Amino acid sequence: MRPLHQPLIVLAVAITLLAQGCGMSSHPAAQATLGKPTGSAEMERVLDQPGPVQLESINSADWAVPLAGLVNLKSPAAIQAGLKDREEAIQVYAHVLKHPQRGSFLVDTGVSKKLLDDPAKAGLSWLLRQGMPIDKMKIQKSTADILDALPGKLSGVFFTHLHIDHISGMPDIPNDVPLYVGKTESTEKNLINLFVHGSTNQLLQGKQHLQEWGFQADPAQHFEGVVDIFEDGSVFAISVPGHTSGSTAYLVRTPQGPVLLTGDTCHTRWGWEHTVEPGDFTQDNARNLKNLISLKKLVERHPKIDVRLGHQR
C-alpha cells in the first residue's frame, strides 16, 4: 500500500464513524430485574383508584435555555403562533417517589452543587460546557439536600432519559444505588451523541450498571410498551421514544390521584397545550409527536391525571 493512501483510509473511516454516530454512553447496561411487562388496558383499569405512593416533585434548579430546544419551532402550530427563538425560563426537577414497602426512589436526579461549582471536575467536557449554558442554572435544592431529606436510603433512580440535565445530580447519587432506563436509551447510535458521550460516561462512572425496562408490545397499541414496576399497579413505566430512543414516562398512583411524569416527551406548558414536541436535540420528531399524542389521549380518557411536564408546571 502506498503511504499516500493511508491518510485517505483513515479519513474515510473517521467519516463513516461520524455518520454512524455512537451510543449516548458506553456504561454497562442489562435488562432490568425489577418490574413486569403489562398493557395499557391493565394500567388504565386501576389508575383512577387512589394509590399508596407518595410523590413530591422538587424544583432542584431554575434555568434559562433557548426556546428552539424546548419546542419544535418548525411545527405548523409554532409557525402559526409566530413563535421565535428566545430565552425561556424552565426548571430542572427531581421527583421523589416513596413506596410504603419498596422504599424511596428518584425519577431523574435534579442538580448537584458539585456540577455547578466545578463542571469540568464533575465530568462535563469542554465542548459541552461551551454549548450548554450551565452558568444560567441556579440551584434551589441540590440533589444532596434532596437525599438528606429522605427517611432512609435511596432505593433506586428511574430515568426519563439520559440527557445531561436529567443526570446532573449523579455526583451525589451513591455508587450502590440501582439505575433504571428505557430500552436502548444508552446504546442506540446517533450522531448527536458524539457531543455528550464522554460527559455521560463521566457522570455515570463508578455507578451501578444501567437496567433497561423490559418493555413488550402493548396489546391495545396505545403505547410502545408498559411495565408495572413494583408488580402491584402503583407505578408504571411507559415507553415513549422519540426525544431519545429510550424516553420513558411514569404514571404514579398517589392517595391524591394519578400523576403523569412526561419527561421530555413534552418540556413546556405551551408544547402540551398545542401538542408540539420538543425541537433541537430531539432524535426523532415524528415519533416524539406520536407518543406525545398518546400521552394526551391517556389524559383525555382519565382527566383526573395530574400532568407534570419535563421542565415546566
Image (cartoon, helix red, strand yellow):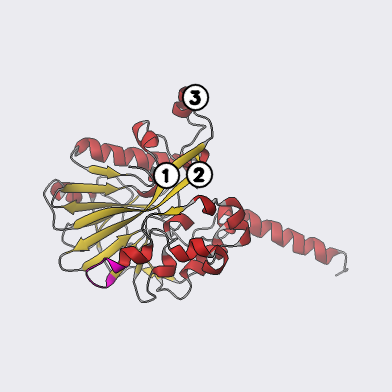
Please state the total of marks drawn on the protein image. 3
Q: Which mark is residue 90?
A: 1
Q: Which residues are magenta?
A: 148-154
Kindly tell me whether residue 53 is visible in this rendering: yes
Left or right: 20 in relation to 112: right
Identify the amino acid type marked 2.
Answer: Val
Q: Indicate the quadrant containing the N terminus: top left, top right, bottom left or bottom right.
A: bottom right
Which residue is under mark 3? 82
Q: Nearer the viewer, residue 69 or 115?
A: 115
The stretch drawn in magenta includes residue 149: yes
Which residue is under mark 2? 65
Q: Nearer the viewer, mark 2 or mark 3?
A: 2
Residue at 41% across, 72% down: 209
The local crowd at label 3, few if under 14, some if 14 to 19, many if 20 or more residues have their Cα within 10 Å, is few
Q: Nearer the viewer, mark 3 or mark 1?
A: 1
Classified by dominant secondary structure, the portion drawn in magenta counts as: loop
Identify the amino acid type marked 3.
Answer: Gly
Asked where in the image residue 265 lies, by quadrant, the reply is top left
